[in-house]
Amino acid sequence: MSSVSRVHVIRQSATKAAKRPDVRLVISGPIGDVCAELDRLAALEQANMARAA
């Protein structure tokens, strides 16, 4: 498998009155690469939650 990412991730944030911003992601590319990116993002969020605890 190539180390070059074929996935495009677009992140758009809008600050709301609440403390959490409204974040939208657009992930496009081959399905296997998109799934791998979703796994990576989930692991990153899990690590961030563990640090915050």
Image (spheres, rainbow, N blue to C red):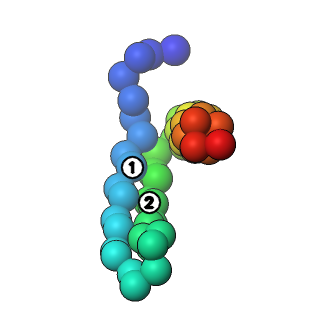
Residue 35 appears anywhere in the view? no
Residue 17 appears anywhere in the view? yes
* Quadrant assignment for the C terminus: top right
Whether 27 is drawn above or below 47: the answer is below
Find residue 13 and report its horizontal and vertical position in percent: 35, 68
CB of mark 1 within 8 Å of CB of mark 2? yes
| Crowding at mark 2 (Cα within 10 Å: few <14, some 14-19, many 20+) | few
The residue that disc 2 covers is: 26
Find residue 4 and report its horizontal and vertical position in percent: 36, 22
Residue 9 circle label: 1
Residue 42 circle label: none
Identify residue type, mark 2: Val
Along the line of sight, the residue nearer the viewer: 35 or 12? 12
In the image, 39: left or right of 13? right
- The residue located at (34%, 75%) in the rendering is 14
Find residue 26 and report its horizontal and vertical position in percent: 44, 60
Mark 1–mark 2 Cα distance, whole angstroms, equals: 6 Å
Q: Sequence-wise, which precedes: disc 1 or disc 2?
A: 1
Identify residue type, mark 1: Val
- The residue located at (40%, 85%) in the rendering is 17
Q: Residue furthest bottom?
A: 17
- The residue located at (58%, 36%) in the rendering is 51
| Crowding at mark 1 (Cα within 10 Å: few <14, some 14-19, many 20+) | few
In the image, 33: left or right of 46? left
In the image, 30: left or right of 53? left
Whether 32 is drawn above or below 24: the answer is above
Residue 5 lies in what quarter of the image? top left
Residue 21 lies in what quarter of the image? bottom left
- The local secondary structure at tag 2 comes to strand
Residue 25 lies in what quarter of the image? bottom left
Find residue 47 and report its horizontal and vertical position in percent: 60, 34
